[in-house]
Image (cartoon, rainbow, N blue to C red):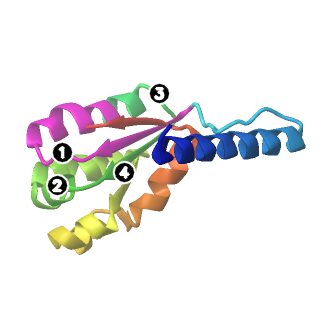
Amino acid sequence: MNYFKKTTLAAYFIFLTLFSFNAFAQGTKPVPIINKDPEKLVIVWTSGDREIAMNMVLMFAKNSYDFGLWTDIEVIIWGPSAKLAASDEEIQTQIKKMIKSGVKFKACQVCADNYGVAKDLSNLGIKVTWMSQVLTQHIARGNYILTF
């Protein structure tokens, strides 16, 4: 067995031992998901394609909220979608209506800065923030995440 395989097996064994010991010490089985909210949907919108925005992202979020399929919907604007949301008036109108009805919108600070649209998105009522922590928390909680 070569050195790489030995060290990989040793690291894996140590990980399993520590993980199992931690669960044993707590008297429970390890549970990776905490505080799951079955009523929360997170939509990660990355596409800069207008058709996807209008006929998939915004339509699905709006209809899901209006028909009560989810009580808490958050749309995360990430990447090229930031530029599209800041430049397309029809999309902006949809976003404003959805925010008024209760759908939450957040945008990635880095993406908005890279495209020079952070102020435009904020003016629409979109919270511009650091997304890595926000998305990591959604994943850790086991929230339902849909990507476009």
Where on the picture, by quarter, is residue 147? top left
Asked whether 47 or 132 is in front, the reply is 132
Give the mark, 1 or 3, whose residue is nearer the N terminus: 1
Residue at x 49% of width, y 47% of height: 3
> Which numbered mark, 2 or 3, is in the foreground of this view?
2
Disc 3 crowd rating (10 Å Cα; few below 14, some 14-19, many 20+) is few
Asked whether 121 or 24 is in front, the reply is 24
Give the mark, 4 or 2, whose residue is nearer the N terminus: 2
Position of residue 75 measured from the top left corner of the image (x, y, whole percent): 36, 47
Position of residue 40 measured from the top left corner of the image (x, y, whole percent): 52, 37
> Which numbered mark, 4 or 2, is in the foreground of this view?
2
Q: Which mark is residue 47?
A: 1
Instruction: Classify residue 85 as left or right of residue 75.
Output: left
Give the mark, 2 or 3, whose residue is nearer the N terminus: 3
User: Where does label 3 land, which residue?
Assistant: 68
Q: The residue tagged with tag 2: helix, strand or loop?
A: helix
Compute the Cα span from label 2 to label 3: 29 Å
Q: Is residue 76 magenta?
A: no
Asked whether 121 or 17 is in front, the reply is 17
User: Where does label 2 land, which residue?
Assistant: 80
